[in-house]
Structure formats: C-alpha cells, structure tokens
Amino acid sequence: MKNGFYSPSLGSIDEERAIDDIVAFVRQDKDAFYNLAIGTDSHGQDPASVSPDKTVEFVTAVVIHRKGYGGKYFWQKKTVDKITTLRQRIYMETMLSVNFAQNFIPKLKMALTNGEKYDLEIHIDVGEKGETREMIKEVVGIVVGNGFTAKTKPYSYSASNVADKHT
C-alpha cells in the first residue's frame, strides 16, 4: 500500500479515491458540522528496547466525523529506520501528521468546490499522564507553528484510537 490508503469499507485505495469518498460523505448532509482529524501513532515498542537497527511502523489516520452521525476513516502505514528514543518517535509521529496535512488538505480543498466546511485538527498521541507529558508544549508548538490546531489526549482520537488500532 505504498502511498495508498486503506479503508475498512473500501479496502486498499489511492489518495484520489480517499478524497472522493470524503467529499461524497460531506455532501450527504451539507448542513451538518464536520471535523477532519489527522493523527499518527507508532507501534508501541518499549523505548528502552529500541535500537539503531530497528524499524518502527507508523500509521497515519484521516478521520472525517459528522457530529452526532458517525464518520469514516482511512489510514496508511510507513516504516522508518533508526528511531532510538521515545522523543524521536513522538516527533516523527507529529511531523508525519503535519507533513501529511500539508500535502493532503490542499487537494481536499480543491475537491470541495461547493463551500463545504469542516474543522481541521492534528491529533498528537501525547497527554498529561505517562512519559510523553514532558513533550506536550514542544509537539503542540510544532503543529501550531505550521498553522494547524493541535489536540492531545484525551481528545486526540485519530492518533490514540484510530491509528493505534492499526499499528
């Protein structure tokens, strides 16, 4: 699935089909409120066991949610070599989401030609509890500095629930 997506309902698809499916979903109810969330999670390795010769799988999920009426999601997987610390892993998750959004959102905006509106969020798999709490300000700063809204746990469902499901 190189540079492609996987959809639970459609199987393996390309980016164009994912965009078409999001557009069709949004146009089903133009008066509804939509949230588009992009988040990345990585395979939950113990950071102490990560060595320079190991690879880490990252899953980026795109979720379109119609408030109160369900949603759809798509995901893609990428393998990265030489992730040696938890900090590197969280930075990579954040940058994969930001880079994905910078590429995907302009294409989606071009396809949404009838003025359909949605809120866009980048979901980061960090929270006030656990080892990642020290990194919240840093990774939120990366997302906000790139012009996006950031959400962390417990509100980062596209990273901590959807992408996590496929790592």
Image (cartoon, rainbow, N blue to C red):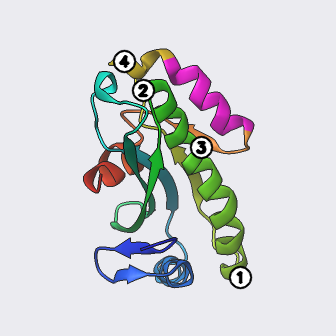
Instruction: Identify the residue at image location x=35%, y=61%.
Output: 68
Q: Percent x, y for residue 55?
A: 39, 45
> Is 49 on the left-hand or right-hand side of 88?
left
Q: Which residue is mark 1?
A: 113
Please identify, in this view, whether the residue under mark 4 or under mark 1 is nearer the observer. Answer: 4
* Residue toward you, 22 or 70: 22
Residue 70, given in percent of the width and then of the height, sits at 33, 66
Q: Relative to residue 55, is residue 100 depicted above or below?
A: below
Q: Are marks 4 and 2 in contact (CB under 8 Å)?
A: yes
Mark 3–mark 2 distance (CA, rounded to whole Å)? 14 Å
Q: Which mark is residue 86?
A: 2
Identify the amino acid type marked 3: Met
Q: Amino acid at mark 4?
A: Glu
Residue type, mark 2 in image: Leu
The answer to which of marks 4 and 1 sits earlier in the sequence is 1
Rendering coords of residue 37 (x, y %)? 49, 54
Looking at the image, which is closer to me, 14 or 30?
A: 14
Residue, disc 3: 95
Relative side of 159 to 11, left or right:
right
